[in-house]
Amino acid sequence: MPIIKDFVLPNSPQDLEVPSPEGRKAFLIFVSSDDPETRQPWCPDVRASWPHVVAAFEGQISPTLHVVKVGQRSEWKDPDNVFRKKWNVSGVPTLARFERVNGEVVETARLDENGIMDVGMLHAFLN
């Protein structure tokens, strides 16, 4: 399935579109924005983990991944950053899984860069 890089994030996790029936999953990854000079993510952890993300999500039977860029370093470091406040993201990259449980959209798991780079943890997270 595809990696969607132009995903428009809703206002809150509860507004995230998670397909029915229950048990279906939506995956978001929060990453640093690209540095305007290098055109690469400014965060070295994002750069290091991205090949693992691509390998996990670009297969024919892989789920869809929605990419969310948290801004430039100064924007990300702001304690009032919307991703820190509304989405409870404390570091990048953060891979989050959302599911519909009892009719409500809830986050059911997340991985940081260490989990993303651990192939076993990443594959368990996807299932």
Image (cartoon, rainbow, N blue to C red):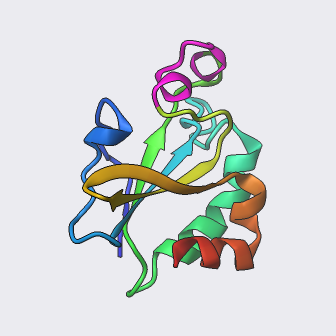
Q: Against 39, is 55 above or below?
A: below
Front residue of this view, candidates 55 and 121: 121
Percent position of residue 14, x then y = 31, 40
> Is 11 within the magenta?
no
The residue shown at (61%, 30%) is 37
Percent position of residue 88, x then y = 56, 33
> Is 85 within the magenta?
yes
Task: Count the numbered circles shown.
Answer: 0
Q: Against 36, is 105 above or below?
A: below
Question: In the rendered image, which quarter is residue 51 located in?
Answer: bottom right
The residue shown at (78%, 58%) is 114
Residue 113 shown left or right of residue 106 in the figure: right
Q: Against 87, is 79 above or below?
A: above
Question: In the rendered image, which quarter is residue 31 located in?
Answer: top right
Residue 79 shown left or right of residue 70 in the figure: right
Front residue of this view, candidates 17 and 44: 17
Residue lying at the far bottom of the rendered structure: 60
The magenta segment: 75-86
The residue shown at (60%, 32%) is 35
Percent position of residue 45, x then y = 75, 48
The residue shown at (35%, 76%) is 1
Residue 103 shown left or right of residue 26 in the figure: left
Residue 111 shown left or right of residue 81 in the figure: right
Residue lying at the far left of the rendered structure: 20
